Image: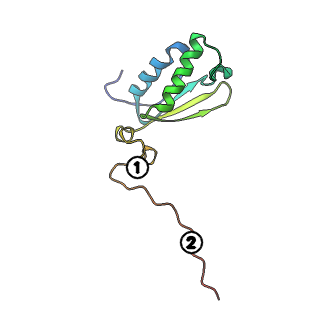
């Protein structure tokens, strides 16, 4: 591995039972703001609770659960094909405080206020 995170994108589509290890390696390689794309996240629907229990399916199901709780990333699962998960690596300060505007504002900044509707013009 490089001595510092230097990759923008890592695509994982390999041995399903190795996905967890590949994911951890990807986070080591990615710079903050970089993304991991994980193929077969839905595994033809076999990952749903009560579905199949073969080792590959269990590995994908386990990683999906882990990704949903991992404070180091923000994730989106796209149901296209067999499913693709996009996990964006957050800066270390954002991972430590996951409620900070999805981790995209530095800790010294305040969250922008919600936009307000323009005021109505005065009556004629």
Residue at the spot 42% in from the left edge and 23% down from the top edge: 24
Q: Is residue 8 above or below residue 116?
A: above
* Residue 3, position as x, y percentages in the image: 31, 25
Q: What's the CA distance linking mark 1 and mark 2?
A: 26 Å
Q: Do callouts 1 and 2 mark residues in contact (Cβ within 8 Å)?
A: no
Question: In the image as oriented, which residue stretches furthest toward the bottom?
Answer: 124
What numbered label is drawn on residue 24? none
Q: Is residue 9 above or below residue 103?
A: above
Mark closer to the chain start, 1 or 2: 1
| Residue corresponding to mark 1 | 105
User: Which residue is more in the foreground, 6 or 91?
Assistant: 91
Helix or strand or loop: what does disc 1 sit on?
Answer: loop
* Residue 101, position as x, y percentages in the image: 45, 48
Residue at the spot 66% in from the left edge and 31% down from the top edge: 79
* Residue 6, position as x, y percentages in the image: 39, 30
Quadrant in which residue 103 is drawn: top left
Residue at the spot 56% in from the left edge and 20% down from the top edge: 60
| Residue corresponding to mark 2 | 118
């Amino acid at each position: 591995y490089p001595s510092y995170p230097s990759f923008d994108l890592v695509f994982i589509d390999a041995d399903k039972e190795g996905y967890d290890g590949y994911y951890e390696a990807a986070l080591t390689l990615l710079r903050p703001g970089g993304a991991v794309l994980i193929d077969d996240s839905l595994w033809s629907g076999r990952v749903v609770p009560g579905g199949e229990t073969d080792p590959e399916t269990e590995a994908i199901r386990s990683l999906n659960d882990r990704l949903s709780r991992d404070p180091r990333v923000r994730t989106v699962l796209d149901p296209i094909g067999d499913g693709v998960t996009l996990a964006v690596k957050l800066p270390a300060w954002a991972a430590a405080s996951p409620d900070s505007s999805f981790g995209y504002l530095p800790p010294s900044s305040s969250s922008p206020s919600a936009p307000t509707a323009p005021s109505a013009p005065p009556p004629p």
